[in-house]
Amino acid sequence: MASTATSASTTNDPLEPIPLIEGAQTDESLNSSLLNHVWRLPGKGWWTLFGLALAGLGLLVVGITVTLWKGIGMWGNNIPVGWAFGIINFVWWIGIGHAGTLISAILLLLQQKWRTSINRFAEAMTLFAVICALLFPLIHTGRPWFAAYWLMPYPSVQGIWPQFKSPLVWDVFAVSTYFTISLLFWFLGLIPDLASLRDSSKKPMQKVIYGLFALGWRGSGRHWAEYKWAYLLLAGLSTPLVLSVHTIVSFDFAVSILPGWHTTVFPPYFVAGAVFSGFAMVVTWMVPARQFLGLKHVVTLKHLENMNKVILATGLMVSYGYAMEHFIAWYSGSQYEFAEFFEVRMRGPMAPVYWLMMFCNVVVPNIFWFKKARTNLLIMWVTALLVNVGMWCERFNIIATSLHRDFLPSKWELYAPTWVDWSIYLGTIGLFSTLFLLFLKFVPAVAVTEVKELRHELAHKAHGHAEEAHG
Amino acid sequence: MFWARTPYARASQTPVEQPLEFDHRHHTRDEGIDCRYCHNTVDKAPFASIPPTQLCLNCHSQVWNKSPLLEPVRQSFIENKPLVWNRVYKVPEFVYFNHSIHVGKGVGCVTCHGRVDQMAAVEKQTPLNMGWCLDCHRHPEKNLRPVSEVTNMTWHAEGDADETARVLAEKNDVHTRTSCTTCHR
Amino acid sequence: MSSHDQDPPQDHPEDHARSTIVGNGASSGSTRRISLPIVDEALAATEAASGAAREQRKYWRSIAEKEGSPKLAAAATREFPPGASELPPSDVSRRSFMKLFGGGAAAAGLAACHPPQEQAIPFVRRPEEVTPGNALHFATAYGVEGFGMGLIVESHEGRPTKIEGNPDHHDSLGATGRYEQALLQGLYDNDRAKQLKHKDQPLTWRSFLGQMAVLSARHAADGGAKLRFLTEPTASPLQLELRKRILEKFPKAKFTSYSSIAGDGAADGLKLAYGKYVEARHELTRASVIVSLDADFLGEGPESVRAQRQFAAGRQTGAPMNRLYVVEPALTVTGMSADHRLRLRAGDVAGFALALATELGRRPGFAQLAGIAGAGRGVTAGDPKWIGAVASDLIKHRGQSLLIAGRRQPAAVHAVVAAINAALDNVGTTVTYATPLLADPLAGPKALVPLAEEIASGQVDTLVITAYNPVYTAPVDLKFDKLLARVPTTVYSAAYEDETAAVASYVIPAAHVLESWGDARATDGTVSLVQPLIAPLWAGYTDVEILSAFLGEGDLGAYEVLRRSWAAKQSTVPGATAEFDQVWEKWVGDGVIVGTETAPEAALALDGAAIQQGLGALLSSAPKGGGIEIAFVPDYKVVDGRFANSAWLQELPDPVHKITWDNAALISPAMAKTLGVEVERDNDKFSVLVIEYKDRRVHAPALIAPGHADDAITLALGYGRTGAESVASGVGFNAGALRGSDAPWFDRGAQVSLATGMHLFGLTQNHWSMENREPAIATSLAEFENAHSEARELIEERRSELPVIHEPHDYSKEQYKWGMTIDLGKCTGCSACVVACQAENNIPTVGQEQVVRGREMQWIRVDRYYSGELEDPEVIVQPLMCQHCETAPCEYVCPVNATVHSDEGLNEMVYNRCVGTRYCSNNCPYKVRRFNFLDFTSETPAVRRLGMNPEVTVRSRGVMEKCTYCVQRIERKRIDVRVAGRLIEDGELKTACQQGCPAGAIEFGNLNDPKSRVTKSQADERRYDLLHELGTRPRTAYLARVRNLNPELAKG
């Protein structure tokens, strides 16, 4: 701690660990660097990205329209491959969401200082990822107009209820809770910053809007006290979610009897995978964002390095998961399990996906054993991208590959996605980007209040040290 | 959720206009004609069936055979064009309701159709939704009566209702089923 | 919302529009009554609705009215066709009612959106026997090759909705084949010819009759020297009678029977052997050793349904089993059922026959065969060891063995086979010979040649064609289309506006068999009366009416002609002594006229000498020389093209090769290698071949067929149609384009090369091997009898009850516990069950593209596995539908309770609750669930919907479906017996597949009844559960197939 404290001063000794806040910052300077971009018109870079994002969003709209108009038949699904892109992308997005909750909640509870300047960013990603994820379970059903509410337990005049034995019903609860909590957590964190935006806004309209969302925040001591409590509480609430959500998502597969799904290792290994892909996604966005938004001084290499460490750790957990799957497949003595892992996946028609997954998730992350890689922006960015790809392949492998060849060889069929599949998938990336860019534009991407707090904390500690030195 | 429980949503309790002023009150109460005289497949088929014109004329060729009210009936018979009635009771396509088994096990007409003998124009009396069907399929006793009394609009169990119900269920060999395919195939 | 959409949930009162066709629709439908003009408009509109607007139809009506045709005028007011008034009262009302109802429902079907206020339309006069909502059953008969199979047709409010076999009928025994099951598709088909035309000008029936009268007057002048009739091969007494009377009137006229799939070898061969034409009849029950020489007697032909039942009877362990040897070029249904199979090119079968004769000739007591074999001049084929073994086996079972030669084989082979059967004393026991029932013993492609010559030499002025589509089916070298153009007057009875209709001068829309009066004979001679189930949906006329037009007896109508002829013949029927009206009613009711069967010929002398000298000639003319052999087969689905417009049959996976919507050039794996055929098995893609033969060539996609003879190609007929049939056109290639009248079945000397590009097949199964998982267990009798053999242990291990985490409900307390057994020993893979199921359960067809994507909808999948080496594999078939697991994996994963278990152990699928997550299918280890990926039903033309089963909901888009054990039948039967106050007895309730199965391989019933057939069969020692190790406790059990191998040939 002490060491980091000094970093508040301007010294930049190479022996010093990378600081959490660079340069001499005052509340004002932080305001200007972190809040004022809201008042400025966004630059070219932003507009280009936003254009691309909107295009992606267009794809999504087209894809969904076609699906609802003609039916699921427009996708590549068939019998036996009843689930494919829809569920693959659902799991992928949900996974990505996890980083945010982990960073903001768990690290908060663990009082990890380095989380401060990236948590807002990560929480936003969680929120948007979950929104993308939520689309899929709905539109992948044959009759969404019923699925939308027949899965909800309510006293219907039909006198029947959902089937609580089904993991899909658990999903409904898990994911909707996750969404609600994430939203609240994110919004609560925003309130003080919204308030300061309200105060610093020039036009009345802006004042009104930000004012509304600031919920009349005055920054009084009482406000702060309540705020701290609420924030802590929500952190406490969302912590178990990090584990529960993906555990339950993994039940979608684990409770089935399908070779390649019917696996007890799924819950832990899904959670690890989720954090793995989540952090990768944060890095993927953080690296460019800190460039374009001038956040270098608050989102320092140290933050990025720490995240890369997490990626490495979770990557190893995932690899262990794979190892276990294969071991059990052999050890169980079930010919179906064995065939699934050692024939269908490794040598079947969809083997390329399997090997790509192995490369991206098992081999690639190991590069982070080296500090050079952990601190090199380009390397970490590429690695993060590969991990995202790898985790998508993992889901494809688990879902489509397992399904296309199961018990009876007579009903083995190939699976090939259609253009609708692709446009919906890319479309959700578009949706995610759109939301994200808007977020970057209209609210501070960094929790300014917390950073100020941190700065004071550090400054204070530094001061304390100085005195000791004298005394 | 609540809307679906209102009679309006179920289009019930509203008399349905018919092309010709047929009055059940007159036929059943005043003339004391048994339901099964006209709805004569009710005990052997899924459908109670709306009587053919011919059947109307069994009587009305003799009585009221000049009445202008009955002109459409006579026309129908002469021109061999059916009378077109407006449906009052209708269950969805995927529901396979069978009158014969219900009548055969002692479920009275009045139980589902209400006091038709008091309706000028027939109206839907019961919600006809799945919860309502299940109510009875789960506890049929309260709606049972001697098979001989099914068309009786005013029958009431004498003495201990529950006891009668139990006895009837026994006697009529009632085994209501709640498996989905009982009604959905 | 269209008619078959699921209803919205009860909570959502909005959009309640729905059809009157499916489900409850029957109620409003059944009580619907609309008079004839409306019917016409309805149907006209129907056509419009289905995209095939027929303007001229209306136009034609107006002409008719202008002409003031009494018949039509009458038709417009009268309800029933002439003759109906003579019917027993019930029939009157039925027929009239049908006509009216047909329109009514069609009209209903038209109305895409009803007003929210629905209407209920009662009868004016309700026919006595019609009880709205209760089905009626009527007997009739139909057959493809001149003989008629007895049928029982189920009718709902006058619409025929399901076809079953007539248990009292000799050829049916209660079962049916694929084609009978698909008849409804032919009836409710918008592509049917609807318009009587002369040179494309609409014509009324009356004016047609007038013109025919003029015509026959002219022909009468020269005794009909230039009048010719080309008919289907037929044994119908009425047709024969008409024929006789026409020939009396026109002594010089000629009749020709023709069917492109009729084989002439048998008739000629037996004539050679016995000095006169006889028909062979087979009794497989008495045969313990059967040798088939290229004879697919289980897969096709009028005897096949009966043959399957009889053959299956001999496949039970614990009783003496029969043994089947098959010699054939390409795998057939019969070949798949063989205990020993020898692959030989069709042209080498003759050699095999002679070799077998020679071999037998060497054995003591068979000298007479030696001579015959001698005439063979050492033509021989086949592995001597094999032949030796067969010979000894035959001798061992002298008198209870049977040789059958196929329709494709030349007279020589049939003669030799006759000789061998005689030498083995089989004549009179397993095979009998009877005077031909068919009008002409010779009716194959060769029979067409004389007629063609006459036409060519201008000796034909009028040609009346009631045979199926000769322009398409005739051998190409006859150039029949050109010939027809040269005949001044051609009258064609057209089921469709097909290739022949395009060139015929008079096109008469043919009445469908379910719209016709007539009669037919079974293969044993028993007569069945053909009665209509519905009045012609469009104007339709029977062959009888067309032929009688030349008798100048006025327009009697088929009914009157038929009835008069039988009134006259009553005395010839033993025991039919009562008043004719009663006798008639009984005949029509029973569907068979008992006592009309014909006895086989008693003492027939085999003329060995004749065979000897006949053989020489025949063999010299037999195909010789090298080169690749091309051989043709009638297709298992469209036969010779006559069923090509039936989507059910087009989409039915070929029993052997699992092809849908296509035909292929079947070649052996070895040949594929030498040709360099490319295969993308996972994508069902194969190279295309160019086959050149004489001056003809076709492009044909290759399909590698394990067990196919080398240097030979098998081509299925009936595809590549160019008629106006919307379903048929553009499907497959026309193999007939290679077919010559000189060698209609097979010949050598074809040149084969690779064309560029690959062909995409709609195969429903592209993985051949069982991957050592043995879902379908087959073993040899020897192994099976050894209680410690591998096979036995495998079976044992798959029948014990596995423990489950929480015990399912105890079903033994229930009244019923439904279960099914499928006997792989009996199942031949003929696939009749698949069509039967499709008809019963309103299963949609999806088209080739969707099949390619793996979205076929048939609830029954007949899996076919090869084992052993690919060149000469062992084959086993396994019908697979929902197994109704007691601990069903599909149920606990459904989030909305759309698939649940009933108190009687049925795995219920509730369509209207399903939201389509497809998790159930993912978790189904048998993959027997089918999903409506797209809207497969709303395009169904209104007229097709008439044939749908009102007892079964039509599923909407996005809904899962699967086999229900025909729960609609269970529930209806339950209600009936409970109203009657008793229990369902064993055997009175059958599933559609069970009822249709010719082999009787499927048992269904109450497992709580210790005496029920299904309980007994599940106790069989061959019984095992599929994927038993998963602990799903399926209610459907399988009986392992036991091959009765000949020890001398048993491998290793």
Image (spheres, rainbow, N blue to C red):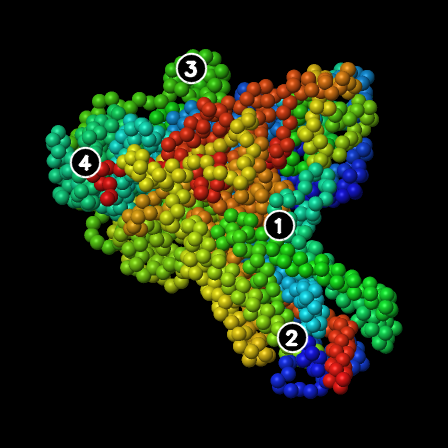
Q: How many discs mark residues in the rendered view?
A: 4
What is the three-letter code of the residue carrying label 2?
A: His
Q: CA distance from mark 4 to mark 2?
A: 88 Å
The disc label shown at residue A130, or none: none
Of marks 1 and 3, the one in the foreground: 1
Report, in whole angstroms, how far the alpha carbon at label 3 lies from the one at label 2: 103 Å
Toward the front, the furthest residue is A471
**Residue behind mark 4:** C391
**Looking at the picture, how far across and down is residue A85, in whole percent?**
57, 59
Point 44% across, 26% down: residue:
C1013
* Element assignment for label 3: loop
Identify the residue shown where x is 48% and y is 58%. Answer: A324
Identify residue type, mark 1. Answer: Leu
Task: Please name the residue shown 34% across and 50% down the image.
Answer: C705
Which numbered disc, 4 or 2, marks the residue closer to the eye? 2
Q: Chain of mark 2?
A: A
Q: Nearer the viewer, mark 3 or mark 2?
A: 2
* Residue C363 image-quadrant placement: top left
Q: Is residue A295 above or below residue C323?
A: below
Check disc 1 and report the residue beneath it: A168
Q: Amino acid at mark 3?
A: Ala
